[in-house]
Image: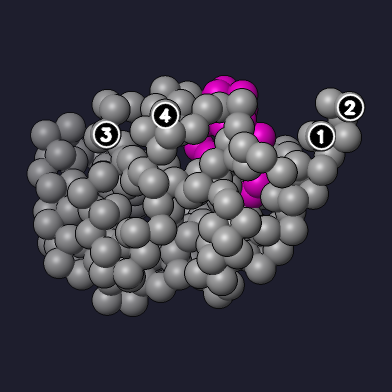
Amino acid sequence: MNNLPLIVFDLDGTLVDSAPDLVSALNFVLEREGLPAVPLAPARKMIGAGARAMIERALEAEGRACTQEHVAKMTDDFIAFYADHIADQTRPFEGTEAALDELASLGHRLAVCTNKLEWLSNRLLDKLNMSTRFAAICGADTFGVQKPDPIILRQTIARAGGTPAAAIMVGDSGPDIGVAKRAGVPVIAVDFGYTPIAIKDLEPDRLISHMRDLPATVAEMLQTKYATSD
């Protein structure tokens, strides 16, 4: 097929299992506040809307009220610590690199659209030797908006040289499903990521449980699209 769609990925919880390093940074700032560390399992559900939101969710869970200025300082400290430990334990999910290789071999271009800061996203993907796979890597600060605002997805697609009409989003949480639907882009969800809401309840177009299933799911979506358009 010609004009194969651009595949746009969320980062944390979709391409990479970054929860251990994110939670380590969260617990670093919480412990400095005299608060108990958050176990990995419940903290995974706090990931997905950026560092500040993760901190705010943890503070809320502990019933701790803080000024916006204090949360901003905690966020700065979180980011500084996280940047130094960004790939201590973070690794691509099983099957991810093989799936990316297969999609690229078929002619798909790839991009990243994340609520992580752009420079942190680049640093992480550099550390994992994955950056060169993507035509664009865009974060929460790239265009001044975060998912689910459709601008971030539309602009990521444009930066990667694509169009919304020929793109597919892949993500693991509400912001990913929301940004795709608002931008008019079909979305494949993974069920192994970070979400406080069951991903199937957010009604993605397709749902997969392992990255090895991604290329076949993309192909099936294309077959359905072209069969419908005939």
State which mark lies toward you, 1 or 3.
Answer: 1
- Image spot of residue 202 (x, y percent): 67, 38
Residue at left 84%, top 39%?
224
Q: Amino acid at mark 1?
A: Tyr
Highlighted magenta segment, given as a residue range: 175-189
Which residue: 88% across, 35% down?
A: 227
Determine whether label 1 and label 3 are within 8 Å by CB. Answer: no
Kindly identify the residue that appears in the image at 89 percent across and 27 percent down.
230
Q: For mark 2, give the secondary structure.
A: loop
Q: Quadrant of residue 102?
A: bottom right
* Disc number placed over residue 142 in the picture, else none: 3
Mark 3 or 4, nearer chain start: 3
User: Are dots 1 and 2 in contact, CB under 8 Å?
Assistant: yes
Among the two numbered marks 4 and 1 on one chain, the one whose residue lies closer to the N terminus: 4
Q: Pointer 4: what residue? A: 158
Q: Which residue is mark 1?
A: 226
At a point 17% along the width and 32% down the height, the residue shown is: 68
Between the residue at mark 3 and the residue at mark 2, the CA separation in whole angstroms equals: 38 Å
Q: At which x and y percent is residue 25? A: 24, 63
Q: What amino acid is at disc 3?
A: Thr
Q: Earlier in the sequence, mark 1 or mark 3?
A: 3
SS at circle 4: helix
